[in-house]
Image (cartoon, coloured by chain):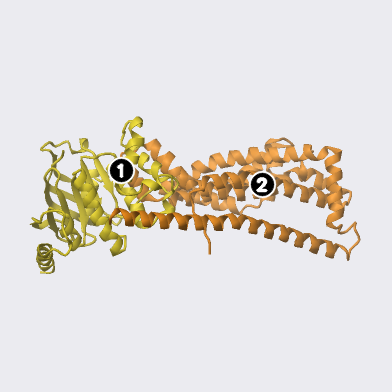
Chain colours: A yellow, B orange
Amino acid sequence: MASIQIKNLHKTFYQKSGTALQVLDNLAIEAQDREFVCLLGPSGCGKSTSLHILAGLVEADSGEILINGKPNYRDASYGYVFQRPRLLNWKTVTDNIKFGLQSYGVPGEQHDARVSRYLSMVGLGAFAGEYPLTLSGGMQQRVAIARALAIEPDILLMDEPFSGLDELTARSMRIELLKVWSEDRKTVLFVTHNALEAVFLADRIYLLTPRPTKVFKMVEVDVPRPRDLEDERLMRIHRDIIKSLVG
Amino acid sequence: MDKTTIIEQSGEQLSSGKLARGKITRLPYQSWSIRILSVIVLLAIWKLISSFYPPTLLPGPDLVAVRIGELILEGDFFVHVYHTVARVFVGFALALFTSIFLGIAMGTSVHLENFLDTYVLVGLTIPGLSWALIALMFFGITEIAPVFAIFVVTSPMITVNMWQGTKAIDKELLEMGKAFRAERSALVREIIIPQLLPHIFAATRFGFALAWKVVVLSEMFGLSNGVGYMINQSFSVFSMVSVLAWTVAFTVVMFLFEFGVLKPIEKHFTRWRPAITL
């Protein structure tokens, strides 16, 4: 149960040479509870930075983040899926997921049940004892998704999770993600530079400008689920988005 | 993707995994037979060359093997090997312990890196012989001398290894750990140390080789026991067969350590790496 309101978020990084790099400029984003929201913008804009701020990896210079209308956003829990799987290769699939559970302070007696529940949810029940490097890239990313889901977070943060996969694998991963998500709807912030991906996944898309990043358009994707990738309505929205991006 | 395709993919993955494992089981056997062959070739070349010289100048491997047998039967062998091995272990353990901290410090702090860089380079350059003599002159004929010499000779090399290892740590994994709110101790235990282990193994391997060379020098020049001392004794009576016997015997001991202790431990810690087959 979590809605997110991000208001007036500012962030400037200072490089070693001293030059200021303004990354976020007055960023304002909203996600309703159980809503799938995409942040769509060009590579190198501050899309990831906003997720980093939510996850506590980076501090914002100024701005306000409200979770369910309350300002203590670090009290909410966040499951993070990165662009690369970022698994610990020296741990088995099971122990990778347990690392997340342990780190997030999930009581030990729940670990086994959570591991088997979320591993089978991503279709990897048979691979619990394998080491990551014996799995394909797509399977590794599914382990990473299971690791994020297993902490049963209020909010799922996904940072271009399929951009490192080949298009066919990415396609089936998107369909699977929506299936998993529809079973247990969480609020999702999904960062991508792929307009088609955003249209297929999202309830709502924020189009972001290049650095310094702010929202220049918000698009509602009012197409019922389950969706068909070839759906004419999705295609139309996609065309509109591309048009407004290219100008 | 529907369930059947997932299962199909899984099956494929499993069978390819088994295929890879089949290759691994063949690999050690091949590598062992080649290793044994290389030893046999070496002994044959030695035997061949020795046939051109009198045995007092260059005894063949057979005579040296007989001498090793005598040394073992006389009982002195294990006493001297014990002294040498003990010095190597103590000196090396101290160096490893210190250098892991120094290396991590250099890998994480630019200031410490710049400060210690010179020491490491100087340490790598100074000959082990100098250190062995300096230690004997300073500490006298004591056990501290060889231990100190081993410590100063191996420390820079281990430090360099740990320093590079620390710099190579995957920062994205640390970020992942922090995003999942892992505690500092968990980050060190679960993410940093596993990535340093291969560097610790490399350092141990080279460190032992260096330590063994230095300890022999210390024992030659000052001490009254140990393998180096016995090699020097053999030299003073011009017994080539004894010099070779002590040298070969100790090399075998170090080999046993490598294959009996170091390799199995390393294998245990790197079991997650799939075998590379070309």
Q: Quadrant of the N terminus of chain A?
A: top left
Q: Is residue B138 visible?
A: no
For label 2, the residue is B131
- Residue found at the very far front of the displayed protein: B4
Q: Are marks 1 and 2 on the same chain?
A: no
Tell me the distance, in whole angstroms, between the alpha carbons under discs 1 and 2. 59 Å
Single out the mark in the foreground, 1 or 2.
Answer: 1
Residue B232 image offset from top left, x and y in percent: 81, 47
Kindly state the secondary structure of the residue where label 2 is placed: helix
Read off the chain for label 1.
Answer: A
Using the image, determine if residue B181 lies above or below residue B166: above
**In contact (CB < 8 Å): disc 1 and disc 2:** no
Residue sitting at 36 percent across and 36 percent down? A112
Residue A18 image offset from top left, x and y in percent: 27, 55
Read off the chain for label 2.
Answer: B
Residue sitting at 23 percent across and 53 percent down? A48
